[in-house]
Amino acid sequence: MKTATFKQYILEFKQASGTSRGVLTTKETYFLEITEGDKKGIGECGIFRGLSFEDVPEYEEMLQWLCDNINENKKVLRKELLHFPSIWFGYEQAMLNLKNGEDLYFPGEFSEGYSSLKINGLIWMGDADFMKQQIEEKINEGFQCLKLKIGADWNSEKEILKQLRANFPKEDLELRVDANGGFTFEEAKVVLQELADLDIHSIEQPIKAGNIEQMAELCKNTPTPIALDEELIGVLNFDDKKELLEKINPQYIILKPSLVGGFSGTDEWISFAESKKIGWWITSALESNIGLNAIAQYTFTKNPKIPQGLGTGGLFTNNLETRLVLHGDELMMR
């Protein structure tokens, strides 16, 4: 018989981090622990307040429900937790960890330290000097792919991109941008051309999620590849996922396991995307090192061909210990 408990944990940012949705100073998360005999498994339920559609008052009640029903059939649990993707993800992690022990979720070359994952360097929003400082640090660290958060002050952000591109051609530095839905439909059409002129790899979520027809039109005619991110959040049904990709037909999709239903939900999205020749990459969503470790081990099993959007765990002052380390732009386990 298994037993389960959960506890809340507040991650503290080393410095306030800006997005088009506001400035973050803390990140709430929950750890789920499942015990069976003398074995223990831990997973992270990484709710993202203000972004997760499961940001509802009964979130902790559902966590308690899972703990009370931890011995229930897996299919029953998934059905009940369908609208709480981060709780389901925490359950998936904890069960894998219970099976594999230590800090293992997907044992193999990555977890044994023999292989690595190439990741992009994330540049947070801020004034021009702050963004330039971050860019310089990432380039000095050896990153060959940078992702810039944009949409707060496009004119200033565009100048930074111009300067970057003048110094580093696309062959030397891949540039991605993430608008978090920060542009209107009409603005986006102009921005997409300006990005193309700067050889930008892709833009995530140029307009707000939910504007399906407008997003489909942008993707059909865009000179810069578009990646769906927030558009995927809350799309849980198997047929709805397929229908969304068929309607919008984006160039890429961005997959955050905490927001799209864990490993199983991510597997479904990847399956649909690859059947339509839509590219993808996996991104963490400010999890602690518990969730990040699980996501990294999983991501390696998908044999990614391009830099992934995984964090490094270095944003927080009170993160947990981890074997994850960064060598240049290669994430690996020591």
Image (cartoon, rainbow, N blue to C red):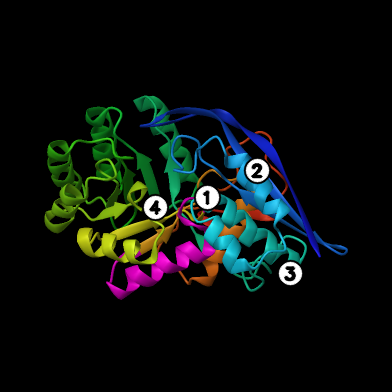
Q: Nearer the viewer, residue 102 or 73?
A: 73
Image marks 4 and 2: residues in contact by CB distance under 8 Å: no
For discs 3 and 1, the disc positioned in front in the rendered view: 1
Q: Which residue is mark 1?
A: 84
Badge 3 is on which residue? 99
Q: Amino acid at mark 1?
A: Phe
Q: Earlier in the sequence, mark 4 or mark 2?
A: 2
Mark nearer the N terminus (2 vs 3): 2
Q: Mark 4 sits on what residue?
A: 145
Q: In the rendered structure, which amino acid carries the disc numbered 2?
A: Tyr
| Disc marking residue 30 | 2
The residue at 81%/65% (across/down) is 1
Q: Return the disc, 3 or 4, that comes first in the chain's sequence.
A: 3
Q: What's the distance in space between the residues labelled 4 and 2, CA to CA?
A: 31 Å
Tell me, yes or no, whether the two marked residues, 1 and 4, touch with CB atoms within 8 Å: no
Local secondary structure at mark 4: strand
Give neighbour class at mark 4: few <14, some 14-19, many 20+ (Cα, 10 Å). Answer: many
Q: Quadrant of the C terminus?
A: bottom right
* In the image, residue 206 above or below residue 303: above
Look at the image and give the residue range highlighted in magenta. Answer: 258-279
